Amino acid sequence: MPNQEGLIIIPTYNERDNIAKLIEQILCLPILVDILIVDDNSPDGTSGIVEELQKQNPRLRLLKRSGKLGLGTAYIEGFKITLQQNYQFVVTMDADFSHDPKYLPEFIADLADHDLIIGSRYIKNGGVKNWPLKRRFLSRMGNFYAKTILNTTINDNTAGFMAIKTNALQKIDLNRINGKGYAFLMELKYTLFKNKAKIKELPIIFVERILGKSKISSNIIKEGLIMPWLLKIQYGKNKKNA
């Protein structure tokens, strides 16, 4: 049931091994939030598990989609629900426990003075566990690459663990955000940054999933490499037309 507090959006695809435990941990926290699971027609029955849990808790919601439509569109649909139903803030997070729910109370508390809270791996006391050296290197270099091209103050441009005030989302055109994977996360942050959102990065330890399979593909990586240049061109044109 919509309220004047927050909505946590969790996109899922084949997360039956994780989703019930994650929902339980979130609902045990001292925060007033609803949870929206956006499931991309998971063949492993993820949505069925959520439907059973809904019978026990009215704070749990489910949006079932027709197929594997991607991270970006899942969050955009969730953001539109957030705006339509007057939540004060929204949280984005993964379903695989790479984003530990224990950070949520601090994220939400810090929204009192900020528009966007980013769970950052690449500031002091942040980090990554269980990643091979090659992936650590690619992620760090990718974030340095994005930060340099876009000339932002954000250290973790591909972070997926965020809390955002609804009134900051209202200032941007969600229909113009077209990125899908990491590129979507980068595009959203940069759009908020260019709209002068007050941003804070909080350190988190990102833990690679234990159960289930990673959803990273070569297309997602390629899109992430191209996106900073597209954003730089787009906002350069906007500045000239202003």
Image: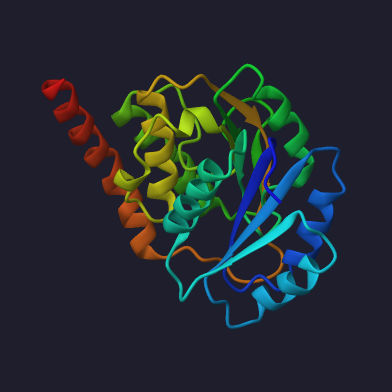
With respect to residue 152, does 224 lie above or below?
Answer: below
Relative placement, left or right, of 37 versus 40 is right
Relative placement, left or right, of 103 versus 203 is right
Relative placement, left or right, of 218 versus 126 is left
Residue 232's spot in the image, x, y percent? 23, 32
With respect to residue 86, does 74 lie above or below?
Answer: below
Residue 8's spot in the image, x, y percent? 65, 47
Q: Residue at x 38, y 48 (%)?
A: 183
Q: Nearer the viewer, residue 214 or 230?
A: 230
Q: How is the structure coloured here?
A: rainbow
Q: Nearer the viewer, residue 20 or 134?
A: 20
* Image quadrant in which you'd find residue 125: top right
With respect to residue 190, does 35 lie above or below?
Answer: below
* Image quadrant in which you'd find residue 230: top left
Residue 140's spot in the image, x, y percent? 48, 40
Residue 220's spot in the image, x, y percent? 38, 59
